[in-house]
Image (cartoon, helix red, strand yellow):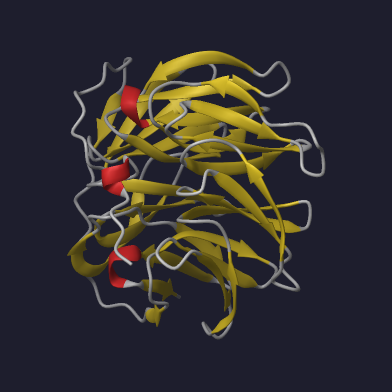
Amino acid sequence: MSITLRAAALGCLVALAGCGQASHHTTSAAAPTPKPTAEKKIHTGGAPIGLLAYAGAVWVADAQRNQLLRVSADSGQVTGRVPVGRTPLRIAAFGGSIWSTDFGAGTVTQISPSTLRRLAAVRVGPQPEGIVGFGANLWVVSQQGGYLARIAPGSARPPTHIGVGNQPRQVTAGGGHLWVSVFGEDSVVEVDPRTQRVVAHIKACGGPQGLAYAAGQVWVGCTNDGVLADIDPKSRKVVRRVAYEAADAVTNTGPTLQVTSDQGPATATLDPHTGRLADKTSLSGVFIGDANADVVAAANAIWVSSPDEGTVYRLP
């Protein structure tokens, strides 16, 4: 079937007004340029978006075929498929299970990574996307609902909601708090998971999407502004902006961050201490127009999804 996820306010469709910035400086970084690589192109078909490295495999959310794929991190072969809810976008591992956010179904699906069986489906509200496990709970972004939902796995209690703003996208954990990118308001929202209250609305950049916590800072990819914004959690201000065209996913891979651009797609390594980009690699010549790229590290390689090509790239 055909999907247009950005038309559902998923990707970088809407050109939002430039956001108000706190005092900051900008680090220049040229747009990624193609260079010879030994990447492996794994054709999955469908529309691979969300990625998760877990238990010796890379798990792929296929938003077109409504399934998760298990790919061997060593061989790159697809070793299993499991149906989930309609339009799965993001994946998280929590409590020994794998969980997918089903954007079109309004659910989160729990599956067993060993048996590839569906264990449960939890209704969280319209257009769930970002997901993270923190404490004893799963935290899920409802894009259309404008809230962060708390799920207690195994409990009969319905999810609780914390309003965060217009068109939230992704969520990450760091420094004891949760951080939500709110695309429709050019902001990042800080949430205290203990009190389940919003602590701060931080004006960040145009079109914030993927985000990660590293070296005591919050980094967010800003698609509309074409930057990676560095937020200081103490001052709750943007302290640095690194130019990166069509910035999208940001993933903590240990001492560094791995980021993607929807132009290509492309990927680069970001040093969270210096703000310098390295190993900039363009993977193809297309612009991702219908969805978002994602990136993870597994088996000493970097994996990048390319939904418009039906492909996942593996870079040594």
Q: Position of residue 65 (x, y in %)?
A: 44, 68
Q: Position of residue 213 (x, y in %)?
A: 54, 37
* Lateral position of residue 189 relative to residue 43, left or right: right
Q: Residue at x 19, y 65 (%)?
A: 286
Judging depth in this view, the residue of 244 and 82 nearest the camera is 82
Judging depth in this view, the residue of 191 and 220 nearest the camera is 191
Judging depth in this view, the residue of 200 and 21 nearest the camera is 200
Which quadrant would residue 177 be assigned to in this image? Answer: top right
Judging depth in this view, the residue of 222 and 162 nearest the camera is 162
Q: Position of residue 176 (x, y in %)?
A: 68, 27
The quarter of the picture where the C terminus appears is bottom left
* Lateral position of residue 88 relative to residue 117, left or right: left
* Lateral position of residue 154 relative to residue 23, left or right: right
Please tell me whether residue 300 is drawn above or below residue 270 in the rendered image.
below
* Lateral position of residue 173 relative to residue 104, left or right: right
Q: Position of residue 199 (x, y in %)?
A: 57, 13
Count the labels in the image.
0
State whether residue 166 appears in this view: yes
Q: Residue at x 28, y 47 (%)?
A: 6
Which quadrant would residue 44 be assigned to in this image? Answer: bottom left
Please tell me whether residue 137 is drawn above or below residue 46 in the rendered image.
above
Please tell me whether residue 7 is drawn above or below residue 181 in the rendered image.
below
State whether residue 235 appears in this view: no
Q: Residue at x 52, y 51 (%)?
A: 102
Q: Residue at x 41, y 72 (%)?
A: 312
The quarter of the picture where the N terminus appears is bottom left
Please tell me whether residue 30 is drawn above or below residue 214 in the rendered image.
below
